[in-house]
Every structure is written in C-alpha cells, then in structure tokens.
Amino acid sequence: MPNKEIEVLTKRRTHYALSNTLPLPAAEVDALIREAIRLAPSSFNSQSSRAVILFGAESVKLWNIIRETLRKIVPAEAFASTDKKMDSFAAGAGTVLFFEDSDTIAKLQEQYPLYADNFPIFSEQSAGMAQLAVWSALSEAGIGGSLQHYNPLPDMEIAATWDLPASWKLRAQMPFGVPVAEPGPKSFVDDATRFRTFG
C-alpha cells in the first residue's frame, strides 16, 4: 500500500558529496528548515529545539572552525582524511546547527519534578525528531545532507562566533546542498532481530 511518509523516509539518505547549489532560493530553504523544526513534536510541547542556519561563506567558516579544532587533537600524519571530510562538508550550500535549550529543560524540571530526570532524555528525543523533520523536508526539496556530531569540541568557538545564548547546547551539524553522487544501497538488520508483534 503506497504511503507518502514511507516514501519520504525512503528518499532521505546520507549524502556526503554535495555541491554549493540549491534548487530553491536560500530564503525558501531557510523557511523550510524553520517550518520543519516548528512542526516537529516535542515532549510536553516544550519546543526546546533551536537552530542556526548558515549559508555560503558562513557555512565554510563553521567547517574551518571545526577543522582547526580537530587539528589540535588529530595526529598530523592522520589529518589528511579529516581535512578531506571538512572540505566535503564545506563544499555544500549551507549547514544547519541543531541545539537544545537547557533553560527550557530546566524550567520543565522545576515545573514537573516527578519527571525531572527524564526531561534531558525527552530533549534528546525532540532533537532527533527535529533533525529527521529537517532532513526529510530538505530531501523532498531535492536537497541532500548528512548528520554530523563534532560537538562538544568546537562548541565554545561556535557560540562566540555567532553570539549564541549560553543555554543553547549543540547537538548536531547538518551540511546540505544538491547531491553530486547517489548513495549506495542501504542494508537492513533482519526484521526478526528488530521487531516483535503480538495480538
């Protein structure tokens, strides 16, 4: 049975090879990302997800910050592959930085003490849903991307560079652009290992 949501999830793939072009004006891509995050579900409707959307030179600046952060800890003889990765991310049209707002989480912990220990977990779940919502929306618009996790290494410099609130905690980075190569086939774990149905 055809299902639009399953079609969208099937289309969403990890694209590492990206061009710096977009099929839509940057303003429309910006609006698409904002709307996807706005509509993503969150526990207690906390809306704890935050985002910084970088285009062009600002995105390149981000990947150079991460590159130089990594240069301090990656052995020089092993840095070539890291350098190549940073080049591939910087080659895209932009990057979405995903954050969770710790102030929002703290307020919920105070308001609902019975669930206090769970709110950081709920926040991570909300972050994942926001990331999938954006990734799927971009994919539907013909824009590829990948999800990266270089935090917390460059967090302080990123916050300083774009003057971000201290309560915004970086969770992921998504470089995006028009894919220049198709990903290989995706393999799946056997259903018997993953699922059990009763009733």
Image (cartoon, grey):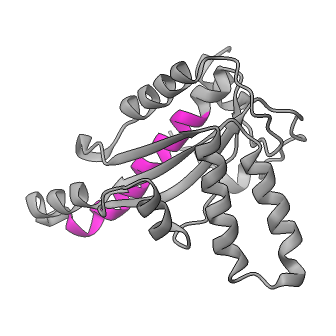
Where does residue 69 sit, x and y in percent of width and height? 63, 73
Q: Position of residue 110 (x, y in %)?
A: 11, 63
From the viewer's perspective, is residue 156 above or below residue 165?
below
On screen, residue 60 above or below 79: above
What residue lies at 61% left-to-right and 63% top-to-bottom? 65
Residues in magenta, as a range? 116-135
State the residue in front, 48 or 86.
86
- Tell me the quadrant of the picture where the N terminus can be found: top right
Q: Quadrant of residue 17?
A: top right
Please name the residue shown 78% across and 41% down the image. 15
Q: Main secondary structure of the magenta part?
A: helix
**Residue 88 magenta-highlighted:** no
State the residue at coordinates (67%, 28%).
139
Q: Is residue 93 above or below residue 95?
A: above
Residue 41, percent from left and from top = 37, 37
Q: Is residue 192 above or below residue 67?
A: above
Quadrant housing residue 178 = top right
User: In the image, 1: left or right of 49?
Assistant: right
In the rendered image, residue 130 lying in the magenta stretch gets the answer: yes
Q: Residue furthest left?
A: 111
| Residue 87, position as x, y percentages in the image | 80, 54
Asked if residue 147 shows in the view, the reply is: no
Left or right placement of residue 113 versus residue 36 in this view: left
The residue closer to the viewer here, 74 or 182, is: 74
Residue 71 visible: yes
The mark tally for this picture is 0
